[in-house]
Image (cartoon, grey):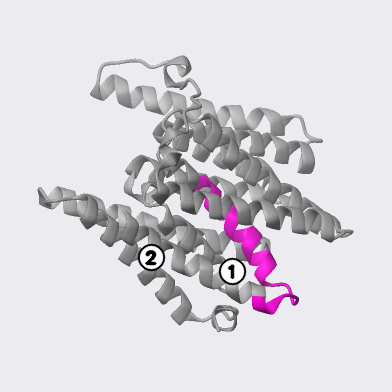
Amino acid sequence: MLTSFFGKSKPVNYVLVAAFMALFFLGHYFKSTETIESFSEIAFQVGMLLIFLLTMLLVDFISRKNKLTYNNTYLIVVFGIFITTIPASFLNAKVLVAHFFILLALRRMISLRSQKDVQKKLFDAALWISLASCFYFWSFLFVIFLFGSIVALVGRNFKNYVIPFVGMATVIILSNVYTLLVQNTFYSPLDWIEIPGFDFTSYNQFSLLLPASVFFTVMLWLSGHFLFKRKVKNKKQKTKNFQLYSLTLIALAIVIFTPHKNGSELAFSAMPFAVLTTNYLETKEEKGFKELLLWLLVLLPFLILFIQ
């Protein structure tokens, strides 16, 4: 049974998930590319593959460090399934890099619950979010999560509200130093802003509509399951739930507002979906349904690979 196998934290599980992700990365890459033009292209794709695999390890690290899930490998399995089912999320290099930077930012923001090194974490988080937005503008919406975390966790110190702006200004200055040296051009923050778009015609493709519908339905059902069927009294658990649902809403906002909708925008939903699904798989009830759900998710990326 899949739930029993991945319910344990074993090194072999990490190897299997990494191999699974690498297989789909290479499969979709060679399927979308007729010829490999140069050695530099190979080196670039190897680099992207490494970043792709590092996102899985980073999600696992964030979860273990902040106790978002128990000691198992459900999280990396569900994360790997989600991200491989949406090929645009890793074939688009800019989105892949932006997603990696956002995970680095989340590593700092979620750990604010510990109340340690607060100002350093705020600076780092703002820096990573700003860097991510240089590659994919709408990832900047995660700054809402940053200031929400400040209000909820460390809002008593006024300096904590100022520090994120220092991190953002640092990226603006450094990016302009680069563009002035390389392109002899100066960019203001206004040049960096993208106008929202609401054209969802790309979701008419079955290969995108199917996984998006499955993930959205599961996420909606699980959110309702935890919100209405479970009364949370523990303060730490309430904070964790607040952060998880906030991340989910921000990820959905990116999907809604981004003007270039091709499925890659769903990458930012991968971590909250994986955590939410893992929290359900860790419960003791409904063992048969949990097994069925996990099998459905595992088979989904294979189905998408063959229908594209």
In the image, taking residue 304 as reference, residue 247 lies left or right, namely: right
The magenta stretch spans residue 268 = yes
In the image, taking residue 197 as reference, residue 34 lies left or right, namely: left
Under mark 1, the amino acid is Leu
Q: Secondary structure at mark 2?
A: helix
Numbered circle sitting on residue 164: none
The magenta stretch spans residue 220 = no
Q: Is residue 63 above or below residue 282?
A: above
Front-lying residue, 304 or 240: 304
- Residue designated by label 1: 293
Residue 285 can be seen, yes or no? yes
Residue ID at (69%, 66%): 280
- Residue designated by label 2: 302
Residue ID at (68%, 65%): 279
**Tally of marks:** 2
Most common secondary structure along the magenta stretch: helix
Q: CA distance from mark 1 to mark 2?
A: 15 Å
Q: Position of residue 22 (x, y in %)?
A: 33, 65
In the image, taking residue 271 as reference, residue 264 lies left or right, namely: left
- Mark 1 touches mark 2? (CB < 8 Å): no
Front-lying residue, 240 or 261: 261
Under mark 2, the amino acid is Phe
Quarter of the image where one finds residue 214: bottom right
- For the magenta stretch, what is the residue range? 267-288
Residue ID at (14%, 51%): 34
Q: Position of residue 17 (x, y in %)?
A: 43, 71
